[in-house]
């Protein structure tokens, strides 16, 4: 009997060890117990397992930040002054600063690649305008992003936007940024956020049209970049850059929504790995196309709860708005775009889709119930709904140029 028991034990252990090589020890244990279909186990089994587990711990380590930023944040006595001394002021309301360490950028890039492989590339878009990227909470990094908001974004917003942000020149740009920051409550940012990554590549989404963000304050940090700008964007960019400056992975800024300079060009920045750009969500900006390589960015939209400025952004134009600069036009958002430039191919395609939708709505609007009965049964409910749309909805189908969408 004892021999049989030993043999049975050895057989079970051998089976466990062999099966564990293929599916893992925990999975094998639940299979042997016969409970591998329990909901709690299935949820655990199907959950994403991070490549770098510390990222899911929710602790923002000092070594993940640029050492200069980490030092400024530890300066509790004169933190605001230390942060203002670290950042570079690129223009009214726009700042750059060293944010993440090289090692953290590499680790996060590896984690994103690992997650993409786990999802077999089938990931939901992070927002309405970017097709490639991921919401970081889906990777189990929600707690880490909360720590980034509380310990980095919030102190930066207080240090940089609590002041009037108007220099000695008293320029219109400065005044517009100061008013926008005050209206958004940027100095009180942020008690909410949306954190995600975006990826640009020549064979995927090469760039992003001019837009403003669904945020009060945006933190945008590059985590990887290799590439060069398209010929058209490079030509436009050279007009605002000094000779010898690199071209590629660029971000251009214009004015503030609702101000006279909304569509007036300000400057262009070159993304650098680990370096963050901090700006108001209401500031119009766009991403230059690249024709080779890729770039990935971590973006946090910081929001002040119940912000009236953000909800009122829309497509407001100042009654005395200055003539638009060609570099600041948006084919997805500006109804007068074709007065200044030809639509890109993507814009032509979307315009055709809008026209087809308009024609469909006009045709359906005139149909009677008797005529609808001739349609297939599964088409009738949606056709009745389209027919009953009010005139304003029919005149401006979703996604039309008169609608301002946020990134």
Image (spheres, rainbow, N blue to C red):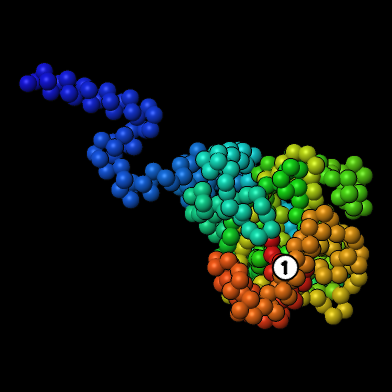
Task: Return the x and y of residue 193 as percentages of the image width and height.
Answer: 58, 62
Name the image quarter holding residue 405: bottom right
Q: Is residue 167 left or right of residue 18?
A: right
Image point 91% across, 49% down: which residue? Answer: 235
Image point 57% across, 49% down: which residue? Answer: 123
> In this view of the protein, which residue sits in the foreground, 255 or 155?
255
**Residue lying at the far left of the rendered structure:** 1
Task: Return the x and y of residue 64 as percentages of the image width and height.
Answer: 57, 44
Q: Is residue 192 above or below residue 198?
A: below
Crowd around label 1: few <14 · some 14–19 · many ≥20 (10 Å): some
**Residue lying at the far top of the rendered structure:** 3
Helix or strand or loop: what does disc 1 sit on?
Answer: helix
Residue 301 makes an appearance in the image: yes
> In this view of the protein, which residue sits in the foreground, 341 or 71?
341
Q: Is residue 271 left or right of residue 342?
A: left
Q: Is residue 378 above or below residue 300?
A: below
> In this view of the protein, which residue sits in the foreground, 152 or 260?
260
Q: Quadrant of the N terminus?
A: top left
Residue 180 makes an appearance in the image: no
Q: How many marks?
A: 1
Image point 36% across, 46% down: which residue? Answer: 42
Q: Quadrant of the C terminus?
A: bottom right
Name the image quarter holding residue 303: bottom right
Task: Return the x and y of residue 85 as percentages of the image width and height.
Answer: 71, 55
Q: Is residue 282 above or below residue 250?
A: below
Name the image quarter holding residue 397: bottom right
Q: From the image, tell me which residue sits under label 1.
A: 357
Task: Return the x and y of residue 19 as percentages of the image width and height.
Answer: 33, 28
Image point 92% across, 44% down: which residue? Answer: 243
């Amino acid at each position: 009997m004892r021999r049989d028991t030993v043999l049975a034990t050895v057989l079970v252990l051998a089976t466990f060890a062999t099966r564990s090589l293929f599916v893992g020890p925990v999975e094998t244990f639940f299979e042997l117990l016969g409970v591998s279909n329990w909901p709690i186990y299935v949820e655990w089994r199907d959950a994403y397992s991070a490549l770098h587990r510390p990222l899911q711990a929710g602790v923002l380590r000092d070594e993940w930040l640029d050492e200069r930023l980490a030092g400024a944040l530890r300066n509790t006595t004169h933190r605001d002054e230390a942060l203002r001394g670290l950042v570079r002021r690129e223009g009214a309301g726009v700042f750059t600063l060293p944010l993440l360490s090289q090692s953290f950028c590499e680790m996060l890039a590896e984690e994103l690649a690992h997650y993409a492989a786990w999802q077999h590339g089938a990931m939901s878009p992070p927002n309405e305008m970017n097709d490639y990227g991921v919401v970081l909470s889906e990777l189990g990094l929600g707690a880490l992003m909360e720590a980034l908001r509380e310990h980095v974004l919030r102190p930066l917003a207080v240090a940089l936007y609590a002041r009037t942000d108007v220099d000695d020149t008293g320029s219109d740009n400065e005044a517009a940024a100061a008013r926008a920051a005050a209206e958004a409550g940027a100095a009180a940012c942020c008690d909410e956020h949306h954190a995600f990554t975006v990826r640009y590549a020549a064979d995927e989404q090469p760039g992003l049209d001019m837009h403003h963000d669904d945020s009060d304050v945006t933190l945008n940090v590059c985590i990887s970049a290799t590439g060069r700008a398209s010929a058209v964007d490079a030509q436009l960019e050279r007009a605002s850059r000094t000779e010898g400056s690199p071209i590629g992975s660029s971000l251009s800024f214009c004015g503030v929504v609702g101000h006279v300079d909304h569509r007036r060009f300000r400057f262009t920045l070159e993304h650098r790995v680990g370096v963050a750009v901090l700006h108001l969500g209401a500031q119009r900006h766009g991403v230059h196309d690249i024709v080779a390589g890729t770039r990935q960015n971590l973006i946090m939209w910081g929001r002040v709860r119940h912000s009236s400025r953000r909800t009122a952004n829309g497509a407001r134009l100042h009654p005395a708005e200055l003539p638009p600069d060609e570099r600041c036009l948006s084919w997805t958002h500006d109804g007068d775009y074709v007065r200044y430039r030809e639509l890109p191919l993507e814009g032509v395609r979307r315009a055709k889709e809008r026209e087809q939708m308009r024609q469909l709505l006009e045709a359906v609007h005139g149909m009677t119930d008797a005529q609808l009965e001739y349609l297939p049964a599964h088409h009738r409910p949606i056709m009745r709904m389209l027919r009953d749309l009010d005139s304003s909805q029919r005149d401006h189908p979703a996604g039309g140029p008169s609608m301002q969408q946020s990134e």
